[in-house]
Amino acid sequence: MISSRRAVAVAKFLGILAVLGLLVHMGTTLFSTRYNTNGQSIFEMWGNSLANNQDYGGPAQAQGDYAPAAPKPVKAALVALVRNDDLYGLRKTIRELEDRWNHKYNYPYIFLNDKPFSEKFKSGVQDLTKATVQFGTLEPGTWGYPEWIDQEKAKHERETATYIKGRSESYRFMCRFQSGFVYKHPLLQDLDYYWRIEPDVHYYCDIDYDPFLYMQKNKLIYGWNIAPSEYEPTVRTLWNTTQEFMIRHADMVPQDSMIDWVRDSKGQYTRCHFWSNFEIVNLDFYRSKEYQAYFDYLDRSGGFFYERWGDAPVHSIAVSMFLKKSQVHYFDDIGYYHPAMSHCPDGSKERGKCVCDPKEGWANGFTCAKRWRQIS
């Protein structure tokens, strides 16, 4: 009997020791993991995360998911200039945008084409989203040559060009349209903001806020993601033409603009530009008398056809010439890939809601991105 009691007592004692050991282990683990590699406590991390979401307009759940047909807090849309044979590439883009972001926000899509869209294209796009989708063809006079262009001279440039897209006529039509007409299309007339999208791109990150609302709340006008330098042979006279414009319209250029992003200390063109295949823009900027005067001046000079001026350098010079840096936003939290270049937020290989390798998404290290961080 005594032996049995001793056995029970020993078992209880060992059980108590086991529980104490477990408690010590849990306490040690909690203490060691209270801090991340930057020395932040987990409570600070949670607090910062909540604060950051609030800065960006809050997550969809806090705002209430936007119903597909319901009015949005911002008059905005995702807009693409595409053709019927872009269907597969565009479906990939829409699938990622929906999975990463728009399934919560349901902002409408607007697709434009220089020719009517096929029923196959329309259904192939509509299959992927609950959001409203609109299809439009381009207005007369917005695609092709304006009457003042010497088409023989333009043809000679194409036939002798050795730079990328240099021999393409339609690419020049596209650049001119994106520079001076997309925001005038009737389907965009009621919009305050647009987000330009393209086929065959990737969005690496979950986006848990409304970029349109963030832009509106913070009085931002232009948002970008990648900033390379332009290929000089395509813009041989763009800067000289811009300087002529600035001399003739000095009253339009504010003293506190961010012109030094595209102009170096010697007054030369840096060729820095925002890659406009990703841009989120308050369309009042493109509709402004200043931007319209600048586009008209460039258009009359013929550089879209006698060279190969792209919409990216045109938009970027205009942004630099007319806006303050505080009105422009770098969406460095959005991982993005367009064929040939990509941006991947730091740390995305190991943590967070992005899945990409920063070593492969190296656009943040471009000279022009660094210059952006340096200018005041």
Image (cartoon, helix red, strand yellow):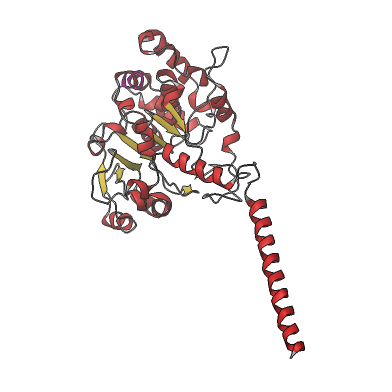
349 and 27: which one is in front?
27
Q: Is residue 287 magenta?
A: no
Residue visible at 52% across and 32% down in the picture: 227
> Percent from the top left, x then y, of residue 151?
36, 27
Closest to the observer, 65 or 302? 65
Left or right of 93 on screen, residue 193: left
Q: Residue pushed farthest front?
A: 2
> Magenta region, mostly helix, strand or loop?
helix
Q: What span is in magenta?
A: 292-296
| Residue 286, percent from left and from top | 33, 26
Q: Which of 298 and 38 is in front in this view?
A: 38
- Most extreme residue toward the right is 3
Residue found at the far bottom of this picture: 1
**Magenta segment includes 295:** yes
- Which residue: 38% across, 19% down? 301
Decide if residue 321 is on the left or right side of residue 75. Answer: right
* Residue 344 visible in the picture: no
Residue 192 makes an appearance in the image: yes
- Name which quarter of the figure residue 361 lies in: top right
x and y percentages locating residue 199 in the rendered image: 42, 47
Q: How many marks?
A: 0
Q: Where is residue 229 in the image (x, y as percent from the top left)?
A: 54, 29
For the N terminus, the quadrant is bottom right
190 and 346: which one is in front?
346
Vertical order, 181 against 58 (above or below):
above
Q: Is residue 160 left or right of residue 29?
A: left
Residue drawn at point x = 57 percent, y = 49 percent: 356
The answer to whether 269 is drawn above or below residue 34 in the figure is above
